[in-house]
């Protein structure tokens, strides 16, 4: 069966520090991968998605970046964190079946980031 | 701009009652529809998917889709306190990524 893992689960970082969140998927190949952010009391905001190795699409311009160095690995990074980057970051995957984004989306456990 | 609207709630129901959660969407060409459950502090969990008009039942859950009215709902029968969570509606179309609603909080009282 397929599983998705994210780490770290929680982190507290000072403003201006770098960030790296990692996500891996097991039990499937060539998944679509997604990074979402959920700020307190707000909805899910899509940050990046990837339909293949090295292919990254950005939904919202900001100081974050994403990379997909391997088929089942997705990394979210920042060189300098802002206070507004605080939130619950969620990695997700879906099987590419027909149209790329109509498949079921499965989320990892999430990474809670607090920027002080 | 595609929109998915949900009443934020909270929707309060007594244990054993039917909870009815509603969602409307703006993109008439939407093809796929999902309901996620999110417990406080946890990640969303997929509970139902529906792709064609009508009802789809899975245990205590029934998803209902009416594309003409651009309306999708989730019914939870015999509601339990463990069903207390925020329920997210998500809508997809072709080569566009899913659009999520902001969720409805459900509170089931014993």
Image: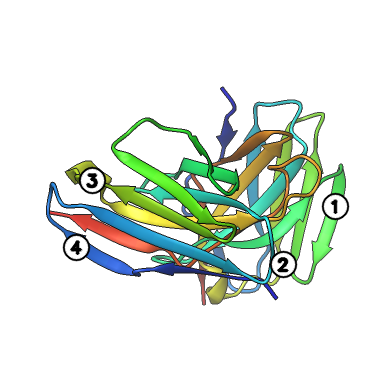
The mark found on residue A12 in the picture is 4
Disc 1 sits on a residue from what chain? B
Q: Is residue A103 above or below residue A99?
A: below
Q: Given contact means CB atoms under 8 Å apart, are the residues at marks 4 and 1 in contact?
A: no
Element under disc 4: strand
User: Residue at horizontal 37%, vertical 30%?
Assistant: A61
Residue B110: x and y in percent read: 52, 77
Disc 4 sits on a residue from what chain? A
Disc 3 sits on a residue from what chain? A
Element under disc 3: loop
Numbered marks: total: 4
Answer few, some or many: residues within 10 Å of disc 3's Cα (few below 14, many 20 plus, some between 14 and 19). few
User: Does label 3 lie on the same chain as label 2?
Assistant: no
Disc 2 sits on a residue from what chain? B
Residue that badge 1 annotates: B55
In this rendered view, identify the residue nearer to me: A101 or A41: A101
Element under disc 1: strand
Answer few, some or many: residues within 10 Å of disc 4's Cα (few below 14, many 20 plus, some between 14 and 19). few
Residue A59: x and y in percent read: 47, 33
For residue A19, side relative to residue A101 (left or right): left
User: Does label 1 lie on the same chain as label 4?
Assistant: no
User: Residue at horizontal 21%, vertical 52%?
Assistant: A18
Q: CA distance from mark 2 to mark 3?
A: 48 Å
Q: Is residue A43 above or below residue A25?
A: above
Residue that badge 2 annotates: B77
Residue B5: x and y in percent read: 56, 36
User: Does label 1 lie on the same chain as label 2?
Assistant: yes
Mark yes or no: residue B105 visible: no
Answer few, some or many: residues within 10 Å of disc 1's Cα (few below 14, many 20 plus, some between 14 and 19). some
In this rendered view, identify the residue nearer to me: A58 or B11: A58
Which is more foreground, mark 2 or mark 3? 3
Residue that badge 3 annotates: A79
């Amino acid at each position: 069966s397929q599983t998705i893992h994210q780490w770290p689960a929680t982190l507290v970082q000072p403003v201006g520090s770098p960030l790296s969140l990692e996500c891996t998927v097991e039990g499937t190949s060539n998944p679509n991968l997604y990074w979402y952010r959920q700020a307190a009391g707000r909805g899910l905001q899509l940050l990046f998605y990837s339909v293949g190795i090295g292919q990254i699409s950005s939904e919202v311009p900001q100081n974050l970046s994403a990379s997909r160095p391997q088929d089942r690995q997705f990394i979210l990074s920042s060189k300098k964190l802002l206070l507004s980057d605080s939130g619950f970051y969620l990695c997700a995957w879906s099987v590419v079946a027909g149209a790329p984004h109509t498949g079921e989306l499965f989320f990892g456990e999430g990474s809670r980031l607090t920027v002080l | 701009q595609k929109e998915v609207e949900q009443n934020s709630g909270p929707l309060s129901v007594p244990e054993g009652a039917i909870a009815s959660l509603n969602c409307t969407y703006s993109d008439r060409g939407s093809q796929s529809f999902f309901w996620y459950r999110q417990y406080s502090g946890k990640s969303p969990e997929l509970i139902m998917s529906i792709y064609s008009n009508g009802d789809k039942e899975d245990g205590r859950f029934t998803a209902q889709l009416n594309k003409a009215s651009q309306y999708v709902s989730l019914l939870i029968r015999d509601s339990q306190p463990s069903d207390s969570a925020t329920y997210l509606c998500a809508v997809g179309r072709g080569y566009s990524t899913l659009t999520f609603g902001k969720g409805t909080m459900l509170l089931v009282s014993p």
